[in-house]
Image (spheres, rainbow, N blue to C red):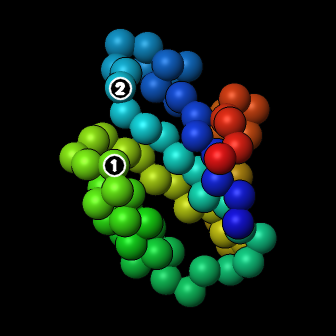
Amino acid sequence: MRVLCFLVRVLMMPKKRGDIDLLFETGQAVDNRATTTGALYVSLIRKLGDRKIDVILKDAATPESPVLVIARQTGIQL
């Protein structure tokens, strides 16, 4: 699994800053994307504290979107 941290708000909505945008990307299909995304979010909140965190999970079944392109172009792999 590849994890990228990116700044979609700076590029698309410059007046809103300060949150953490994370893309979790895997080539495998994820059975329950909502549950997996929620579990990732809860784990991050427990480790980082109460911060604004946006979690995107891209699996084999997720269609491409502009935010995924931005994440790949500007993101820093963690």
Whole-angstrom CA distance, mark 2 to mark 1, is 14 Å
Few, some or many C-alpha atoms within 10 Å of disc 1 (few <14, some 14-19, many ≥20)? few
Residue at image point 29% right, 60% down:
46
66 over 63 or under it: above or below: above
Label 1's element? helix
Q: Position of residue 78 (x, y in %)?
A: 65, 47
Relative to residue 36, is residue 45 drawn left or right? left
Q: Which amino acid is tagged 2?
A: Gly
| Residue highlighted by disc 2 | 18
Q: Is residue 62 visible from the viewing direction of this image?
A: yes
- Farthest residue, direction top: 15
23 over 29 or under it: above or below: above
Few, some or many C-alpha atoms within 10 Å of disc 2 (few <14, some 14-19, many ≥20)? few
Viewer-nearest of labels 2 and 1? 1
Quadrant in the picture for residue 7: top right
| Residue highlighted by disc 1 | 48
